[in-house]
Image (cartoon, grey):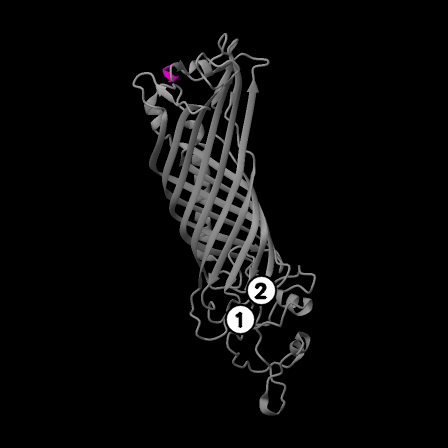
Amino acid sequence: MTAYRAWTAMVGVLCLSGTALAQTNYLEANDPYGVRLTRLDYSTQPSLNYSGASGGQPVVGTPASARMQAPATAPQAPPDNTSSSGAAASCDTCNSCGGSYENALHNCGWGDECGCNLPSCCCNDHWYAYAGGLTMGRTVANRNWTTYDTANNAHQLLYFPGANWGGGVDTRIGYWFGCGCCGDPCSCSNSCGPTGRFGVEADYWGVWGMNGNALLTNSTFSLGTVQDDSGVSFGTNPATDWYDNRTGSPVTAVRLSRNDDINNVEVNFLYMPCCEACNRFQVTALAGIRYFNFRDNLTWDQFTAVPPAGSTSDEAIINANVTNNLVGFQLGAYLNYQICSRWSVFAAPKIGIYGNHITGYNAMALSDGTQATFDANGDVLHFNNSANVFSMLGSIDVGFNWAFSSNWSFIGGYRVVGVSGVALADNQIPQFFADEAGWKTIKTNGDLIVDGAFAGLECRF
């Protein structure tokens, strides 16, 4: 039910994003995360007034107050990429250097006044690149108990551990085609079309070191396994000699270890609709392909101080490893709200359906290399398995963007990724060790949620 609610919420977000896309125009100079410096005063430019000077040349650079006091004259045809309606109005009063983005450029030394040579304009910054770091953790399956106190059957002691938070990298590079809409101040010629702008971007992020460990000794308890360990042997010695607390062959310790990592690759195609003057809320649609790799490895070690007769090892080891490889198509949007000329907040929801090729490895052996076999037929408990299923994946990034210069921005935020229909290592060990079919079959009905924070720098060039 929790997974169903999560997907329902994600679909709702995307539906709202689609509605906003249909009703709202995008500020053409913004990149998908709102990292590019947005010109908040994209209002139509004033017509040029004539001062009566010989030659009828327009007066340029006249202060706004002087233009307001000049006698009204017949409006003249505006130059390319301008409009003849109204006086320019600043859409922002937040920036300490003077309010609007143009004022920030002029007063803070970022560049020239408005025009198609503005650093934020599309004609001059087709490329953008981001690099940062992230730290993420993951949910684990329901508690799968392995060990109990044989003196008290109701006293469960140990289950597969969770994963610690790991670290990784977060990168992105993109390219915008063309110059956007005709009539946009950032369009440098009349060759631009009336539609929006298209772009493409490639993303990679990965997290490693999501490890977990648990250790229990029999200094206080008599240790036994929750699983039924009959029907499996190491040579001539039954597995119960290592998994059950017996007189002369007690279980001295149990150690459980987990090692996980994630790799994510995306190629997305972007569409940015035409801009509208002074619109603070912007939407860019995306569609693309995604590869999501999740590896989950478990190791279960059982130790005995006095090995059974004829044995050369006091350690029995179970390995349960699975790797999920999701490839599929996704839809999404970049939503950005410009708070002021240097600050914005964003959300980037995505959802898709994927083909999931799963590989698994299950084995049981002693530390000296002796492999476990099934008593019924002598088959070795050592299997490489695979399965193919459909999975669903949704993610959302939320965060902020601080444009501290004309070409550089600092981005920080939080990412949540939810996946259904995956194989988890916790679910691969059957309740009965003698269940050979259970060791061979990959269980694929698990759910995974990964979340964590990211931060980094983006450059436009």
Residue 164: where, in percent of width, then height?
Answer: 56, 34
Depth check, front residue: 179 or 103? 179
- Whether residue 13 sits left or right of residue 49 in the image: it is left
- Whether residue 368 sits left or right of residue 440 in the image: it is right
Q: What residue would you read off at disc 1? A: 185
Depth check, front residue: 400 or 381? 381
Residue 365: where, in percent of width, then height?
Answer: 42, 23
Residue at the extreme left: 377
Which region shows up in magenta? 230-234
Residue 275 lies, with reference to residue 260, above or below; the image says below
Residue at the extreme top: 247
The quarter holding residue 342 reads bottom right
Q: Secondary structure at mark 2?
A: loop
Amino acid on which disc 2 is placed: Arg
- Whether residue 35 sits left or right of residue 285 in the image: it is right
* Mark 1 in CB contact with mark 2 (< 8 angstroms): yes
At horizontal 48% and vertical 14% (from top left) the residue drawn is 307
At horizontal 62% and vertical 68% (from top left) the residue drawn is 102
Quadrant occupied by the C terminus: bottom right
- The disc at residue 39 is 2
At horizontal 40% and vertical 27% (from top left) the residue drawn is 363
Quadrant occupied by the N terminus: top left
Residue 355 makes an appearance in the image: yes
Residue 351: where, in percent of width, then height?
Answer: 43, 45
Q: Is residue 231 magenta?
A: yes
Depth check, front residue: 183 or 381? 381
Label 1 crowd bin: few (<14), some (14–19), many (20+), radius 10 Å: many
At horizontal 50% and vertical 34% (from top left) the residue drawn is 259
Residue 47: where, in percent of width, then height?
Answer: 57, 78
